[in-house]
Image: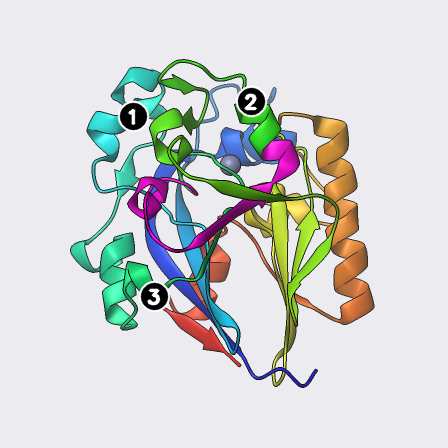
Amino acid sequence: MTNEFSATMLPVGKFQTDLTWMLFDPAKIMATRQEPHKPAQWVDVPVHTVLIEHPEGKILWDTGLPRDWETKWEPTGILDFWPVVADEHEWFDSRLNEVGVSLDEIDYMIFSHLHWDHAGNGSLFNGTNAQVVCSKAELDGVSSIKGYCEGPYIRHDWSELNFDTVEGDVEFLPGVKLLQTPGHSFGTMSLQLDLPDTGTLIFTSDAVFLGDNYGPPSITPGFNYDSEAWLSSVEKVRRVAQETDATVIFGHDAEQVRRLGDGPVRWT
Ligand SMILES: [Zn+2]
Protein backbone atom coordinates (compact mmCIF):
# COMPACT_ATOMS: atom_id res chain seq x y z
CA MET A 1 0.00 0.00 0.00
CA THR A 2 2.16 2.79 -1.28
CA ASN A 3 -0.45 5.19 -2.58
CA GLU A 4 -0.62 8.29 -0.45
CA PHE A 5 -4.25 9.26 -0.24
CA SER A 6 -6.83 10.17 2.36
CA ALA A 7 -10.52 9.65 2.94
CA THR A 8 -12.81 12.00 4.84
CA MET A 9 -16.25 10.89 5.91
CA LEU A 10 -18.66 13.83 5.91
CA PRO A 11 -21.88 13.43 7.90
CA VAL A 12 -24.55 15.25 5.89
CA GLY A 13 -27.70 15.30 8.01
CA LYS A 14 -30.06 12.54 8.97
CA PHE A 15 -33.47 11.02 8.57
CA GLN A 16 -35.72 9.92 11.37
CA THR A 17 -37.81 6.83 10.83
CA ASP A 18 -39.37 3.68 12.27
CA LEU A 19 -36.64 1.14 13.02
CA THR A 20 -38.67 -1.54 11.21
CA TRP A 21 -37.52 -0.14 7.83
CA MET A 22 -33.91 -0.67 8.83
CA LEU A 23 -33.93 -3.82 10.92
CA PHE A 24 -36.53 -6.55 10.65
CA ASP A 25 -35.59 -8.10 13.98
CA PRO A 26 -38.61 -9.68 15.71
CA ALA A 27 -36.93 -9.35 19.12
CA LYS A 28 -36.65 -5.59 18.72
CA ILE A 29 -39.72 -4.60 16.77
CA MET A 30 -42.54 -7.12 17.16
CA ALA A 31 -45.32 -7.20 19.72
CA THR A 32 -45.41 -10.26 21.95
CA ARG A 33 -47.76 -11.90 24.44
CA GLN A 34 -45.83 -10.13 27.20
CA GLU A 35 -45.78 -6.81 25.35
CA PRO A 36 -48.82 -6.73 23.03
CA HIS A 37 -48.72 -2.96 22.59
CA LYS A 38 -45.00 -2.61 22.07
CA PRO A 39 -44.39 0.90 20.72
CA ALA A 40 -42.64 1.50 17.41
CA GLN A 41 -39.10 2.84 17.71
CA TRP A 42 -38.43 6.18 16.04
CA VAL A 43 -34.70 6.31 15.34
CA ASP A 44 -32.05 8.57 13.83
CA VAL A 45 -30.66 7.50 10.46
CA PRO A 46 -27.50 9.50 9.72
CA VAL A 47 -26.35 9.98 6.14
CA HIS A 48 -22.75 10.45 5.00
CA THR A 49 -20.63 11.08 1.95
CA VAL A 50 -16.92 10.32 1.55
CA LEU A 51 -14.32 12.62 0.02
CA ILE A 52 -11.20 10.84 -1.24
CA GLU A 53 -8.19 13.00 -1.98
CA HIS A 54 -6.00 10.89 -4.24
CA PRO A 55 -2.93 11.76 -6.32
CA GLU A 56 -5.01 11.01 -9.42
CA GLY A 57 -7.90 13.26 -8.43
CA LYS A 58 -10.63 14.04 -5.94
CA ILE A 59 -13.38 11.46 -5.63
CA LEU A 60 -16.74 11.96 -3.99
CA TRP A 61 -18.71 8.92 -2.89
CA ASP A 62 -22.44 9.82 -2.76
CA THR A 63 -24.03 13.24 -2.29
CA GLY A 64 -26.46 12.89 0.62
CA LEU A 65 -29.73 14.69 1.29
CA PRO A 66 -30.96 17.76 -0.60
CA ARG A 67 -31.90 21.00 1.18
CA ASP A 68 -35.26 21.05 -0.64
CA TRP A 69 -36.18 17.50 0.44
CA GLU A 70 -39.65 18.44 1.62
CA THR A 71 -40.87 19.83 -1.70
CA LYS A 72 -38.86 17.42 -3.80
CA TRP A 73 -40.08 14.31 -2.03
CA GLU A 74 -43.68 15.41 -1.47
CA PRO A 75 -44.97 13.51 -4.56
CA THR A 76 -43.46 10.24 -3.34
CA GLY A 77 -46.11 9.76 -0.67
CA ILE A 78 -43.63 8.41 1.87
CA LEU A 79 -42.33 11.73 3.09
CA ASP A 80 -43.78 11.45 6.58
CA PHE A 81 -42.11 8.08 7.06
CA TRP A 82 -38.65 9.54 6.45
CA PRO A 83 -38.44 13.21 7.52
CA VAL A 84 -35.02 14.87 7.31
CA VAL A 85 -33.32 16.71 10.16
CA ALA A 86 -30.18 18.74 9.47
CA ASP A 87 -28.53 21.79 10.95
CA GLU A 88 -27.17 24.45 8.60
CA HIS A 89 -23.58 23.21 8.92
CA GLU A 90 -24.57 19.64 8.07
CA TRP A 91 -25.93 20.06 4.55
CA PHE A 92 -23.82 18.67 1.70
CA ASP A 93 -22.66 22.08 0.42
CA SER A 94 -21.85 23.27 3.96
CA ARG A 95 -19.73 20.20 4.60
CA LEU A 96 -17.81 20.65 1.32
CA ASN A 97 -17.17 24.30 2.31
CA GLU A 98 -16.01 23.14 5.72
CA VAL A 99 -13.31 20.95 4.15
CA GLY A 100 -12.47 23.59 1.53
CA VAL A 101 -13.55 21.71 -1.58
CA SER A 102 -15.76 23.15 -4.30
CA LEU A 103 -17.97 21.11 -6.63
CA ASP A 104 -15.87 21.84 -9.72
CA GLU A 105 -12.80 20.40 -7.98
CA ILE A 106 -14.43 16.96 -7.89
CA ASP A 107 -12.89 14.77 -10.61
CA TYR A 108 -14.94 11.64 -9.99
CA MET A 109 -18.50 11.52 -8.64
CA ILE A 110 -19.24 7.91 -7.73
CA PHE A 111 -22.72 6.89 -6.60
CA SER A 112 -23.12 3.79 -4.45
CA HIS A 113 -26.66 3.72 -5.89
CA LEU A 114 -29.23 6.29 -6.95
CA HIS A 115 -31.69 6.44 -4.06
CA TRP A 116 -32.74 9.92 -2.93
CA ASP A 117 -30.50 10.02 0.15
CA HIS A 118 -27.36 9.11 -1.84
CA ALA A 119 -28.03 10.91 -5.12
CA GLY A 120 -30.06 13.73 -3.51
CA ASN A 121 -27.60 16.39 -4.68
CA GLY A 122 -26.67 14.57 -7.88
CA SER A 123 -28.15 17.24 -10.14
CA LEU A 124 -25.53 19.71 -8.82
CA PHE A 125 -23.10 17.77 -11.03
CA ASN A 126 -25.08 18.42 -14.22
CA GLY A 127 -22.62 20.03 -16.60
CA THR A 128 -19.57 19.82 -14.29
CA ASN A 129 -16.33 18.19 -15.42
CA ALA A 130 -16.61 15.32 -12.97
CA GLN A 131 -16.69 11.82 -14.39
CA VAL A 132 -19.94 10.39 -13.02
CA VAL A 133 -20.00 6.71 -12.14
CA CYS A 134 -22.45 4.09 -10.91
CA SER A 135 -22.86 0.36 -11.47
CA LYS A 136 -24.26 -0.86 -14.76
CA ALA A 137 -26.91 -2.83 -12.87
CA GLU A 138 -28.13 0.32 -11.11
CA LEU A 139 -28.29 2.39 -14.29
CA ASP A 140 -30.04 -0.44 -16.17
CA GLY A 141 -32.49 -0.80 -13.27
CA VAL A 142 -33.50 2.84 -13.14
CA SER A 143 -33.89 3.08 -16.91
CA SER A 144 -37.43 1.72 -16.54
CA ILE A 145 -38.45 4.68 -14.33
CA LYS A 146 -40.30 7.09 -16.59
CA GLY A 147 -42.25 9.30 -14.20
CA TYR A 148 -41.11 11.79 -11.57
CA CYS A 149 -40.30 9.16 -8.98
CA GLU A 150 -40.52 5.50 -8.11
CA GLY A 151 -39.93 4.21 -4.58
CA PRO A 152 -36.86 6.01 -3.23
CA TYR A 153 -35.75 7.16 -6.70
CA ILE A 154 -36.29 10.73 -7.93
CA ARG A 155 -35.43 10.91 -11.63
CA HIS A 156 -34.39 14.57 -11.44
CA ASP A 157 -31.47 13.61 -9.16
CA TRP A 158 -29.63 11.75 -11.91
CA SER A 159 -31.51 11.96 -15.21
CA GLU A 160 -29.29 14.69 -16.71
CA LEU A 161 -25.98 13.08 -15.72
CA ASN A 162 -23.73 11.29 -18.21
CA PHE A 163 -22.82 8.10 -16.44
CA ASP A 164 -19.88 5.81 -16.92
CA THR A 165 -20.77 2.44 -15.50
CA VAL A 166 -18.76 -0.33 -13.89
CA GLU A 167 -19.45 -4.06 -13.92
CA GLY A 168 -17.91 -6.53 -11.50
CA ASP A 169 -15.46 -5.54 -8.80
CA VAL A 170 -12.95 -2.98 -10.06
CA GLU A 171 -9.91 -1.12 -8.80
CA PHE A 172 -11.09 2.31 -9.89
CA LEU A 173 -7.85 4.08 -8.90
CA PRO A 174 -4.90 2.53 -7.06
CA GLY A 175 -6.17 1.60 -3.59
CA VAL A 176 -9.79 2.55 -4.42
CA LYS A 177 -12.00 -0.44 -5.17
CA LEU A 178 -15.68 -0.65 -6.06
CA LEU A 179 -17.40 -3.85 -4.95
CA GLN A 180 -20.68 -5.03 -6.42
CA THR A 181 -23.02 -5.56 -3.46
CA PRO A 182 -26.55 -5.57 -4.93
CA GLY A 183 -29.80 -6.54 -3.21
CA HIS A 184 -30.73 -3.34 -1.38
CA SER A 185 -31.21 -1.82 -4.83
CA PHE A 186 -30.60 -2.98 -8.42
CA GLY A 187 -26.87 -2.41 -8.23
CA THR A 188 -25.68 -1.03 -4.90
CA MET A 189 -21.88 -0.83 -4.67
CA SER A 190 -19.60 -0.72 -1.64
CA LEU A 191 -16.33 1.19 -1.48
CA GLN A 192 -13.09 -0.46 -0.39
CA LEU A 193 -10.17 1.84 0.41
CA ASP A 194 -6.71 0.40 1.05
CA LEU A 195 -5.24 3.37 2.88
CA PRO A 196 -1.52 3.69 3.49
CA ASP A 197 -1.62 4.25 7.28
CA THR A 198 -5.09 3.13 8.36
CA GLY A 199 -5.27 -0.08 6.35
CA THR A 200 -8.52 -1.10 4.72
CA LEU A 201 -11.85 0.63 5.20
CA ILE A 202 -15.06 -0.64 3.62
CA PHE A 203 -17.93 1.81 3.24
CA THR A 204 -20.95 -0.40 2.69
CA SER A 205 -23.50 2.27 1.78
CA ASP A 206 -26.94 0.65 1.93
CA ALA A 207 -25.61 -2.85 1.27
CA VAL A 208 -25.54 -2.87 5.09
CA PHE A 209 -27.53 -0.17 6.93
CA LEU A 210 -26.47 -0.94 10.49
CA GLY A 211 -24.05 -3.01 12.51
CA ASP A 212 -27.15 -4.87 13.71
CA ASN A 213 -27.90 -5.92 10.10
CA TYR A 214 -24.32 -7.16 9.69
CA GLY A 215 -24.29 -9.38 12.78
CA PRO A 216 -23.35 -12.14 12.55
CA PRO A 217 -25.97 -13.40 12.23
CA SER A 218 -27.10 -10.99 9.54
CA ILE A 219 -30.59 -9.56 10.02
CA THR A 220 -32.51 -8.29 7.02
CA PRO A 221 -33.86 -4.74 6.82
CA GLY A 222 -37.60 -4.14 6.39
CA PHE A 223 -37.21 -3.74 2.64
CA ASN A 224 -34.87 -4.96 -0.09
CA TYR A 225 -34.99 -5.06 -3.86
CA ASP A 226 -33.73 -8.66 -3.78
CA SER A 227 -33.32 -10.29 -0.37
CA GLU A 228 -31.22 -13.25 -1.55
CA ALA A 229 -28.79 -10.95 -3.32
CA TRP A 230 -28.76 -8.74 -0.20
CA LEU A 231 -27.71 -11.69 1.96
CA SER A 232 -24.95 -12.73 -0.49
CA SER A 233 -23.69 -9.16 -0.53
CA VAL A 234 -23.51 -9.00 3.27
CA GLU A 235 -21.50 -12.21 3.29
CA LYS A 236 -19.28 -10.83 0.53
CA VAL A 237 -18.54 -7.71 2.59
CA ARG A 238 -17.77 -9.95 5.57
CA ARG A 239 -15.43 -12.12 3.49
CA VAL A 240 -13.53 -9.13 2.05
CA ALA A 241 -13.39 -7.50 5.49
CA GLN A 242 -11.89 -10.66 7.00
CA GLU A 243 -9.38 -11.07 4.17
CA THR A 244 -8.21 -7.46 4.46
CA ASP A 245 -8.68 -6.97 8.22
CA ALA A 246 -10.91 -4.03 7.30
CA THR A 247 -12.90 -1.62 9.40
CA VAL A 248 -16.46 -1.66 8.09
CA ILE A 249 -18.35 1.65 8.01
CA PHE A 250 -22.07 1.00 7.70
CA GLY A 251 -24.43 3.09 5.59
CA HIS A 252 -26.66 4.60 8.27
CA ASP A 253 -25.52 3.50 11.72
CA ALA A 254 -26.19 6.26 14.30
CA GLU A 255 -24.23 4.52 17.04
CA GLN A 256 -21.18 4.15 14.81
CA VAL A 257 -21.35 7.78 13.67
CA ARG A 258 -21.55 8.87 17.32
CA ARG A 259 -18.49 6.76 18.15
CA LEU A 260 -16.63 8.40 15.26
CA GLY A 261 -17.39 11.84 16.69
CA ASP A 262 -20.40 13.14 14.72
CA GLY A 263 -18.28 15.41 12.48
CA PRO A 264 -15.94 14.94 9.51
CA VAL A 265 -13.48 12.07 10.15
CA ARG A 266 -10.28 11.83 8.13
CA TRP A 267 -8.22 8.71 7.58
CA THR A 268 -4.86 8.50 5.80
ZN1 LIG B 1 -30.72 3.13 -0.57
Secondary structure beneath label 1: helix
Q: Which residues are magenta?
A: 118-138
Disc 1 to disc 3, how far (Cα)?
Answer: 29 Å
Q: Residue at x 55, y 30 (%)?
A: 29
Q: Residue at x 54, y 79 (%)?
A: 5
Secondary structure beneath label 2: loop
Q: Tell whether position 170 is magenta.
A: no
Of residues 209 and 55, the one drawn nearer to the viewer in this rendering: 55
Q: Residue at x 29, y 54 (%)?
A: 92
Query: Which mark is in front, 2 or 1?
Result: 1
Question: Mark 1 or mark 2, which is nearer the start of the sequence?
Answer: 2
Question: In the displayed structure, would residue 226 be above or below residue 212?
Answer: above
> Where residue 139 appears, x then y in whole percent?
56, 32
Q: Residue at x 36, y 20 (%)?
A: 78
Of residues 133 and 219, the one drawn nearer to the viewer in this rendering: 133
> Where residue 87 appears, x then y in whole percent?
20, 53
Disc 2 to disc 1, how far (Cα)?
Answer: 31 Å
Say what amino acid the circle numbered 3 marks. Answer: Glu
Tell me, yes or no, if residue 231 can be seen here: yes
Instruction: List the residue tagged with mark 1.
Output: 73
Question: Mark 3 or mark 1, which is nearer the start of the sequence?
Answer: 1
Does ligand 1 reach within 8 Å of label 2's beta carbon?
no
Of residues 56 and 32, the one drawn nearer to the viewer in this rendering: 56
Picture quadrant of residue 83: top left
Picture quadrant of residue 129: bottom left
Say what amino acid the circle numbered 2 marks. Answer: Ala
Circle 2/circle 3 CB separation < 8 Å: no
Tell me, yes or no, if residue 223 can be seen here: no
- Which circle marks residue 105 in the picture? 3
Instruction: List the residue tagged with mark 2.
Output: 31
